[in-house]
Image (spheres, grey):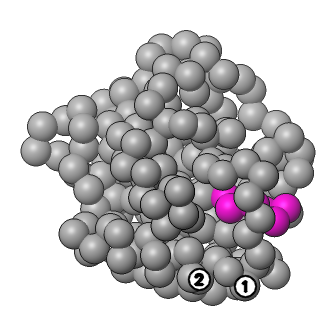
Amino acid sequence: MNLRTKVFLFLALGIFTCASGIALAKAPSTATASTQSSDNISVINILDNKATMTLPEEFKRMSAKQLATQYAAANPPPKEAWYIDTGKNVIALTFSFPYPGKALQDEQVPMVAEMMKTQMAQLNPVLTTKKVNGHTVSRLELAMPDGTRKGASNHMIIQISSFNNELMMSTFTVPAELKDKYLPTGLIALDSLKY
């Protein structure tokens, strides 16, 4: 199976199925690992302390049980996820490694993003590529139907990058009606990612 087919299958079976309709099972989340705090914003250690990111303190880390429940259809499931549960909606930021052991160099990121954009053409994604803290990242920004709320949609940013020479997909998902409030938070978090 070629990389293009694998990328498509991962998106079709995993990210879209799960991120388009997150309805959290009520389970205690693990505490945030904060290294510094200012105005309710913290720099947190993520991905087994191999990276940091800036998030508002209202974001909580999903427990292993929550990850297994919420991303049961994803293969593999996200390595880590952070979320805000507003009581009515969930805003989520996930980190996935869809092809463990498959090499991806920094300079290959835009090519993978172009393939994904082509495969997702029916959703009209907007593709941008830039450097974030020394790493090439490509972002696909799009709206898609919410699998749990009839007639509702979610706004997503799928960030593609090379993390330790593997494809990492960082996905920020917010209900469309909360986009104006939370999209800047997601962009700040993605722009703050350091590893």
Relative horizontal placement of residue 92, taking residue 33 as reference (left or right): left
Q: Which residue is mark 2?
A: 110
Of the residues shown, which amino acid type is indicated by label 1?
Glu
Of the residues shown, which amino acid type is indicated by label 2?
Pro
Query: Alpha carbon of mark 2 to alpha carbon of mark 1: how far?
Result: 7 Å
Circle 1: element type:
helix
- x, y percent for residue 188: 61, 67
Relative horizontal placement of residue 53, taking residue 49 as reference (left or right): left
- x, y percent for residue 180: 35, 63
- x, y percent for residue 194: 81, 65
Q: Is residue 23 above or below residue 114?
A: above
Q: Identify which residue is drawn at 59% across, 57% down.
A: 170
Q: Is residue 26 above or below residue 54?
A: above
Q: Which residue is mark 1?
A: 107
The answer to whether the residues at label 2 and label 1 have Cβ atoms under 8 Å apart is yes
Q: Identify which residue is drawn at 85% across, 62% down.
A: 164
What residue range appears in magenta? 163-168
Q: Which quarter of the rendering shows the C terminus?
A: bottom right
- Residue 39 falls inside the magenta stretch: no
Circle 2: element type:
helix
